[in-house]
Amino acid sequence: MGKEITSREQDYNQWYNDLVIKGNLADYSAVRGCMVIKPYGFALWENMRDVLDKMFKDTGHQNAYFPLFVPKSLFEAEEKNAEGFAKECAVVTHYRLKADPDNKGKLIVDPEAKLEEELVVRPTSEAIIWSTYKGWIQSYRDLPILVNQWANVVRWEMRTRLFLRTAEFLWQEGHTAHATAVEAIAETRQMLDVYADFAENWMALPVIKGVKSPNERFAGAEDTYCIEAMMQDGKALQAGTSHFLGQNFAKAFDVKFSDKENKLDYVWATSWGVSTRLIGALVMAHSDDDGLILPPRIAPVQVVIVPIYKGEEQKALLDATVSGIVTQLKALGISVKYDDSDNARPGWKFAEYELKGVPVRMAVGARDLENKVVEIARRDTKEKTSVPIEGIAEYIKTLLEDIQLAMYNKAKQFRETHISQTDSWDEFLQLLDTKGGFVSAHWDGTAETEDKIKELSKATIRCIPLDNPLEDGKCILSGKPSTQRVLFARAY
């Protein structure tokens, strides 16, 4: 086939790249650090986007769209936010090119077309959105504002990896405005729950909900809540964040409202987002050395049917039977592809759909028709079963749910066996080097110790789990008193 995949054991990073490229999810582009999302990868993103979009709308949110460009003065208004993103900003300084008089056929920047104010290409949209909200909000009657946008953002990364870290990526960003801190915090927590629900019930990806340490917070936030997932190489991946922004952006952009007593106060804010990095999480959490394994609920194709025949007469008989099966599956809302193309042998097709992670493969031949059965292969376990054609649609519907649950349980079991607890610094380092995963350990709560642990171990505090039990102990590094354990890991 010419699509050999590097094994996870041999080179995990190369394995990941092989799956993304050879599984037809994405490709490198002419722009360094950016990617092309191919139709199969984009179909996966669309399925994820559609589910999330419905979840957002079911919780009262509406979609809007804001400009790609942010005037530099607006971007600077919230100092912590500007400082946090400054190193990753792409900046537009001119608006025109012209022919180079000294080099025919070449273009140069027209020095006379310099912008009066430079424009930042959005790395995140708080600045442009909060400058807009100022005109939308006068009184408590204008609140809450519950807005989401689906967009692209640019963060000029020097070291990039397809889906996980690219200079431009797709995401959604919710930006809400509230009359009280209590309401804004409830919104932040609600959206964290939405993300966890999506990750676990649609992506089959178990996550830990928690809050970030001050060091790891979003720039400009009072609190950052997150969901953390575990990849098969024992590294953690932040799968979504929800931020309580306090009144920081309202103060920066002078967004005030008059309350029921006619008193003026600053608005309370949240922001929250997930991105196409979730596709990277899917690949790394579930797939194997033969290709992608996609959860049925968001797989672009849930069932592929491959006919095995000799001659047009057999093909016509198969077509008639398969047509009925396809109709039944579609009636149950199952996405199905009948691959009767004659440009590849069945064996090649089997390997191709295995590589692409299609959850269920059905093979049907002339002898199967005689026996009124089809062969069903499930992608996650590779088990093959001969199943009667009678009632096949309901059988597959149940099988898809079984696969979804089995994938979640397998990933959860892996994560559970990769959470370790230690009170010893030497064991802490040993666990990270040999086992990986989450290490639950005490930390004294200071940024200095957190930075030192990161420097010495390359591990960061992934989160302080919500409802974390309080427990007296000593910091893993400094030996100073601590009131609770936190989760450390090396991460993407």
Image (tube, grey):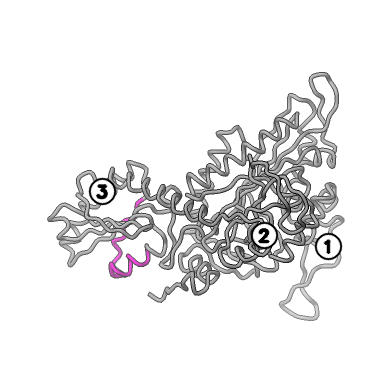
- Mark 1 residue element: helix
* Residue 130 falls in image quadrant: top right
Q: Give, as a single range, the part of the protein colored magenta.
A: 336-353
Question: Which residue in the protein does label 1 denote?
Answer: 113
Confirm or deny contact between disc 1 and disc 3 (CB under 8 A): no
Question: Which residue in the protein does label 2 denote?
Answer: 424
Q: Is residue 193 above or below residue 140?
A: below
Residue at left offset 75%, top offset 41%? 245
Q: Nearer the viewer, mark 2 or mark 1?
A: 2
Q: Residues within 10 Å of mark 1 (few under 14, many from 20)?
A: few
**Label 2 vs label 1: CA separation?**
61 Å
Mark 3 / mark 2, whichever is N-terminal:
3
Visible residue check, residue 371 = yes
Tell me the kind of residue under disc 1.
Ala
49 left or right, relative to 255: left
> Disc number at residue 333?
none
Q: Is residue 22 above or below residue 294?
A: below
Give percent across and percent down for residue 220.
Answer: 78, 47
**Label 1 vs label 3: CA separation?**
62 Å
Residue at left offset 44%, top offset 50%? 409
- Mark 2 residue element: loop
Q: Nearer the viewer, residue 18 or 457?
A: 457
Q: Nearer the viewer, residue 116 or 17?
A: 17
Mark 2 / mark 1, whichever is N-terminal:
1
476 left or right, relative to 194: right
Visible residue check, residue 95 = no
Residue at left offset 51%, top offset 52%? 416
Q: Nearer the viewer, residue 174 or 184?
A: 184
Magenta highlight on residue 347: yes
Question: Which residue in the protein does label 3 denote?
Answer: 325
